[in-house]
Image (cartoon, rainbow, N blue to C red):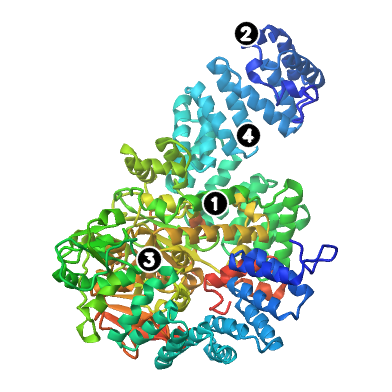
Amino acid sequence: MKDEFCPCGSGLRQALCCAADMTLWPSQEAAALLDDKAAEATKFFNEKKYSEAEALALKILDAVPNQRAALRVLFEIRNAQKRTKAADALGARLARLPGPPALRALANGQYAQYLVAQGRHAEALPFAAEAVKAAPKAAQAQHVLGVVFTETGAVLAGERHYRRALALLGAEDGMVLGNLAWNLKLQGRLSEAEALYAKALALRPDNLRGTGGLAQVVFTKGERARADAMLDEALARWPQDRMLRLLKIMAHLACQRPREALEQLGPPESQMPPELLARGRAFMQLGQMQEAISAIATARTMQRERTGLVYQPEALRAQVEQFKAYFTGDRVRPLPRAQTGGFTPVVLLGFPRAGSSLLEQLLAQIPGFAPGDEAAPVAALTQAAAGLLGGEYPECLDQMLVGEAEHALERLRDMYESSRHAMGLARPGVRFITDRAASNVWHLGLIKLLYPEAPVIHVLRHPYDLVLSNIAQDRKLEGNAQAGLPGLARYFTLQAEMIRHYRGQLTLRYLPVRYEDLVADPVAVVRRVLDFIGVKAQLPPDFAANAAPVAEPLPAHFAGREAVHGRAAWRFKPYRAALPNLFSEVAPILDPWVRELGYEEQGA
Amino acid sequence: MSGAAQPGKVAMPLAEALDKLARLEQASKLEEADDLATRMLAAMPEHPHILQLAGIISYRSGRVAEAIERMEKSQAISPEVALYPRNICEVYRGAGRLEDALRAGRRAIELAPGDSRSHFNVALIHYERLELDDAVRVAEQAIALDPDFAEAHFEKAEALLLAGRLRAGWESYEWRFKLKQAEGMLPQTEKPQWEGQTMEPGKLLIIGDQGFGDCIQFARFIPWAAMLAPQPVVACSAELLPLLSQLPGIGKIVTRWDDAAGYEAYIPLSGLPRLAGATIETIPPAGYLAPKPALAAQWGERLDRLIPKGKKRIALVWAGRPTHKNDKKRSLKLSQFAPIFARDDVIVLTVQKGEQIAQAGGYYGHAPLVNLGPEIEDFLDTMAILQHVDRLVTIDTSVAHVAGASNVPTSIVLPYAPDWRWLLHREDTPWYPSLRLYRQSVPYQWEDVIQRVAADL
C-alpha cells in the first residue's frame, strides 16, 4: 500500500510522504549529498522549466525524502498548480525540517505567508511564531507574525510585532506602517491610525489596501463626507478594484442610500457573494423583500456550491457539552474567585445582530463608560489558564483548589486588565468598560470566576429577526453558521442553551433587555441598565441621537453609528407575510425559543 | 418477549402474558411493560384487564389522559369488577378530578364493602376536598376492617391535625413509623421510646426523623425535652446540624447512630408535640433560629454588590423535592410566578436548590432575577440571605420553616388541601407568626393565589 502515490497529490509515494516516519529519514548531512542535483532542480524552476524541475525534484525526494531544496521546488510547483493538499503537506514538512536557524526561519516564514495568503491565519500562527523564534532579528518574520496576530484578533500582540519589524528595518516601510495602521484601527485608536496611514501612503501611494483602510478609519470617526470623497478619489484611480467598490457600497448602505448602492453594484450577473449580499441589503432598505431574499439566496447558494460553505456545528457542540459538564453549581462553588479588579467590566451578551453594539454605543455616551467591544476577549485567557494551571481548559481550573494555584485567577484578571490599559480603555475616569466579545457567550463560567459581580446585560431580539438579519450579512460566524437560515437557527439554539445552562448553574448579575424595547425607548432601557449596574448618571441631552462625543478608542461598529431607530424591529413580520415559506424550516427550531424568551406573549 | 399480537411468532397464553405484564409493572420496568401492553392491546383491544394494566402503566409513565381513557374503557366493559373503580379512583385523584375520584371510590366500596383499601382511597379524597369529618369517618371504616392499616391511621391523623384537633391527632400520628416509607428512620434498638419522664443528663436520644421542614418545626420542643431529660443527644442529618445546634439545652448532636450510643430512651423529634401535649394555644414561639452574624454580614455585603438599590428584594422558592409524596400538589414552575415578575418595584432573588434551579436559566421576565441558589451551601447561607430580603415567597418546603423559625416575613402558597400543619381557613399560623398563608381556592389552580401574593408585596 505504501508504494502507492500519496493521496495528498504530491506525486511522491505515500511511504515517503504523508505516511512516512520522519525519524527514519536520513540526516541533513546525508541529504546534503544531493545538493548539487537539487540545485539543478532549482535552476530548472527558476528558468520556468517546470516539467523538468518537477521530474527531478520527485526523483531526488524518492531517494532522500527530506532533501530541503527539492522539497522547496516541489512545494512551489504544487502551490502554483493550486494542489492545496499537496502544497500544505510539503510546506509543513519543509518547515519542520531540522537545520540551522536561518533555514528554519525561512521555511517557517514562507509557509506562514503561504497560509496567510489563503486567509488561514490561525493555522499560520505556529509557523509564523517559529520563524520569529528562529530569527528574532528578521523584520519580515516579525511583520508576518504581526499580520497573523492582528488577523486572529490578538491585536496587541500584532502591534508589538509590527513595531519590532519597524525598529528592525531601521527605516519606515510603507507596507508595515499601513498594516500597523490597520491594527490600530482595529483597536479603535483612530487618530493614531489615521496619522500612520498618512505616513504609509506618503511612502507607498500605490498601497490600495492602505487607501481603503484610511477611508474606513475616517468613516468610523464619523467624517462620512470626507471618507466618501476619499473612496471616490481612490475609485477614480483604481476603477476596477472590487474591494474599494465594495467599501463605497458599504458606505452607501450605512448612510441609508440603497439606490446609490445598487447603482454602484451594477448588474447582478457578474457579482460575487459579498456583492450579492450587499445587493440583498440594499433591497431590504428599499423594502423590496422578494428581490432582497432572492439576491441573498443566490449568494448563499454560490458560497455553498463554490466553496462548500455549510454549517459545521460539531466542534461548537462538543465545546458546549464540555462546558456544561464542567460548569455546574456544585463544581464551581468551591473554586476561588478573583479579588476586585481595577474596573468593572460590563459584559454585553447578544447573538450577532441582536443590538449589543447599539447598547454599547449608547452607554459610551455616559461618563465613566468606555466601549471595549471585542478587545482582548476572555476566551483568549483560557489558553493562558491552561498554561498557568496545567491541563486542559476548563478542567484545569480544578487545580486552583490546590496549593498556591488559586492566585492564577488574579494573574488572568491582570492580563485581562493590562490589555485594556494598553489600548487606552482603562484611563482615568473610566469605571466601566463594556465587553462585547462574541465568544463571551461560551465563557460566562470563567467570567464569573474573574469578576464574580460583573453585570451581564443580555440584549435579546426576536429570533426570526436575528436569523433574517444575519443571513444578509457578509460576516463569518462560528461553524459557518451564516451559510443558511437553518444553520443560523441551530447556532442560535446552541448559544441560547449555553446561556440557559450558565444562568441555571451560576449566580450571575444578569439582566436581559430587549432590542425592540431599546429602539422604542432607549432612555428607559438604558436607565434600567444603569439602575441595575448601580450607576446614577445624567444622560446627555438628545440621548437617542446617539451622537455625543465619545473618546477613542472607538470600536469598528461606530462606523454604523446613527440615531436610534425602529426600522429593523419586528422586520420578520412583513417578510413572513410576503414570503410565507421563508421561515418554515427554522420555525420548529426557533419557536420554542420564541416562547421561552417571552416574545409569544407580545403577540409575535 | 413474543407477544400474542405479533404474527409469525409463538403466541403466549393470555394468562401468562397478563401475569408477565403485571410483574413488569410491579417491578417498575415501565418501558418493557409499555411495549408488551401495546402489543397485547393491538391483539385484544377490548380485553378489560389488559386495558386496566395498560392504563396503570400509562399513568405511571406520566400519560394521564391515556391512562384514564384505557381505565374508563376497562370499567365500562366490566362494570362489576371492584378493582377497576378502585384503581381509577387514585388516577382521578392524581389528575385533580376529585368529583370523579369520589364517585369511583364509592363505586369500589359498593362493589367490595370489605376492601379496606377502597375506604382508604375515599378518605384521601375527602381530605383533598377538605371534608375532614368524612375523611376521619371513612379512615376509621378502613381501620375497622384492618386495624393494622398504618396508612389509614396516618390519614386519620392528618385529617384531625388539619382540623386543628391536635391532641387527638397526635395519637394517630404515632402510626407514621409503621408506614413503609418510614423504614430505617428509627434506630434498631431494644431501648424504650421516651414517655416524657425525667432522666439523667445525656441519656435521652432525640431523633430528627422526618423531612427537614418537620425537624425545623418541631425543634422548638427540644428545650422542653431538655428540661426533663437534660443534655439530650440529638441525631439528625448533616444538613440540619448547624441549625439544630442553635437550640438551647442540647448535650451533643450526632449524624451517625454509632455516635449516639449510651442513651437509655429515644424519641423522634416529631413525637415531642404529643408528649408536650401541644395545642394551638401552647405551641412554643418561633424565633429560635438566627443566622450567624458574620455570615449574615458577609451575605449582606455580597447582595449589596449584586443587587441594585431601590427595589424590594423578594426571595423565591418555587419547587420542592420531587420525591416528596405531595410534591405535585405543592410545587410550581418558576414561570407561574409571573404576576410578581411583572412588578416594576421588585428584584427577585431565587434561593431555590436542587434540580429545579435550572428553570432560572430560562427566565426572561420583567423584574431582574438573581439566581442565588448556586452559591448557597447550606441552610445557614439561606438563613443569612433571608435576613437581607424584604420578603420570602415560597411553596410549602423546608425554606419556609427556616424563614419562619428565624422570623423572616414570608408569603407561603399552599394547595387547596394543605399539609396538616397549616390548619384551615386562616391566613396566619400559630407555628410561625412571620408567615402569611395564601391558599388555593380551587384545587390545583395557582393563578389567583400568585396574583394575591403579588398584589400584597
Image quadrant for the C terminus of chain A? bottom right
Between the residue at mark 2 and the residue at mark 3, the CA separation in whole angstroms equals 68 Å
| Chain of the residue on which disc 1 is drawn | A
| Chain of the residue on which disc 2 is drawn | A
- Measured as percent of width and height from the top left, residue A171 is found at 47, 27
Q: Which of B76 and A181 is in front in this view?
A: B76
Label 2: which secondary element: helix
Contact, CB < 8 Å: mark 3 with mark 1? no
Q: What residue type is labelled 3?
A: Val
Q: Which amino acid does label 2 sit on?
A: Glu
- The answer to which quarter of the image holds residue B242 is bottom left
Find disc 4 in the rendering and name its residue. A115
The residue drawn where x is 72% and y is 23% is: A17
Q: Which of marks 1 and 2 is in front?
A: 1
Residue density around tag 2, few if under 14, some if 14–19, many if 20 or more, within 10 Å: few
The residue drawn where x is 75% and y is 71% is: B14
Find disc 2 in the rendering and name its residue. A29
Label 1: which secondary element: helix
Between the residue at mark 1 and the residue at mark 4, the CA separation in whole angstroms equals 31 Å
Q: Nearer the viewer, mark 3 or mark 4?
A: 3
Left/right of residue A193 with respect to residue B46 in the rendered view: left
Find disc 1 in the rendering and name its residue. A321
Q: Nearer the viewer, residue A174 or B40?
A: B40
Of pointers 4 and 2, the one earlier in the residue sequence:
2
Of pointers 1 and 2, the one earlier in the residue sequence:
2
